[in-house]
Amino acid sequence: MSKYLLNKFLFTIDRDPELVERYRADPRGTVEWWDSDRACVILNCPDAERSTWLKFTDDEREALATHDYVRLFELGAHNFLVLTLFIALFERDYEEPLAFQREFAAKLSHWSLPYPDIST
Amino acid sequence: MAKIAAVIASTHHPFYLRASTSTGTDRPPFADEWVAKIEAFRETLTRANPDVLVMVGSDHFHQLWLDNYPQFLVGKAPCYDANFYNEEREFGLPRMFLQGDEELSAYLLRQGLDEGFDLAFSNELRVDHSITCPLITLRPQADLPIVPIYTNIFAPPLPQPRRFVELGKAIRRMVEAWPSDKRVAIIGTGHLSLELGGPRQFGPHGPDPEFDRKAVSWIASSDIDTALAEVSLDSLWLPGNATHGFMDFMLMMGVAGENMKADYTDSLDLFHTMEAYFTWYPTEASS
């Protein structure tokens, strides 16, 4: 399990407008590219000084590749990162203000406390 | 010595700018009341006539990241750019540019370290909506130098609530002992009950109105003992999964001082989360 890597994916996609669109249009392809190319880049180090050990579990990779925010919640991805990125991805598809955010909540309504642990 | 012109604690609702400037059918029904409350709250800072603002907030995974995450960080830079692409995208917040006060930053870092707070620092900090929202509400002209102080309310493991209170008390002591003739306002923003990315988000009210009622009462009377007795890192999950931001209010209670009743208190029950506004005038209270 790598909650840290899940969060790193969400964080690095969310802060780049081109990657937000790429992930919206082609989630599986974006995850595959990111997994092989970007996952081990330490954000404040040159690309050559990479980590050598970070990898997703199959479950994590699949949750990202299918835009499955319920599964991401269950896997302990950081709630703020998931919400912010998924608003950017899908809010535009809903007519009513906050309709996506409310649907997001409703899809998690089977959850009560304690929620999955988000600590990394 | 420097004078503390005002101590201000507030929620930081990123939708205020958009709600307050929207017109016609886009304007939400609560916008007029919200604007009236913010303008009255703004007057409490204007009246204090500050020269510099110490601003306590929290980075929302903008510049600070999990490969190197500080618990408490003081900005020490001559200037700060502000707001990020995803805040522009989601909240309509503008890019901003703020002057810093490096002398006060350096002083707080040195004194803080000497008082036992291992403060991180940043010489190039882009601040986010936790700092810019209170500027938009309280000082929209954004014409005063700031010293940003970031706390970790976001990425576990977090410091204990009492540590936030202790840091608040230390900031108060340090600013009062700052050899300067400046008038300093200390402004901090946090959250009441709040849920983000969970099943209780974006409801008609905050996720836990009972917690909000108690929290407003603790803050308004700076009842630090009760707040510390009732709040823990574990308990703060219960009112909503982003309620650890309440610890920034606890920090501000430390700045205001034990059992110091706020000179100004207001709140507004909104969708998603309750807004709350508090101002203390320490110089008047102690004179």
Image (cartoon, grey):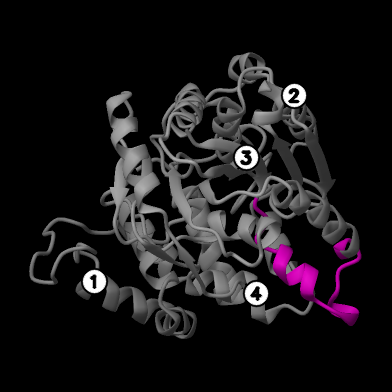
Residue B272: x and y in percent read 74, 52
Label for residue B5? Answer: 3
Residue B248: x and y in percent read 55, 37
In space, the residues marked 2 and 3 are separated at their CA atoms by 16 Å
In the depicted structure, whether residue B205 falls above or below residue A72 = above
Let me know if residue B22 appears in the view. Answer: yes
* Quadrant position of the C terminus of chain B in the picture: top right
Q: Which chain letter matches label 1?
A: A
Q: Are marks 3 and 1 on the same chain?
A: no
Q: Amino acid at mark 4?
A: Glu
Magenta range is B12-31
Q: Is residue A11 magenta?
A: no
Confirm or deny contact between disc 1 and disc 4 (CB under 8 A). Answer: no
Q: Earlier in the sequence, mark 1 or mark 4?
A: 1
In space, the residues marked 1 and 2 are separated at their CA atoms by 52 Å
Q: Amino acid at mark 3?
A: Ala
**Nearer to me, B187 or B227:** B187
**Tag 4 residue:** A91
Q: Nearer the viewer, mark 2 or mark 3?
A: 3
**Tag 2 residue:** B261
Q: Amino acid at mark 1?
A: Arg
Give the image quarter of residue B77: bottom left
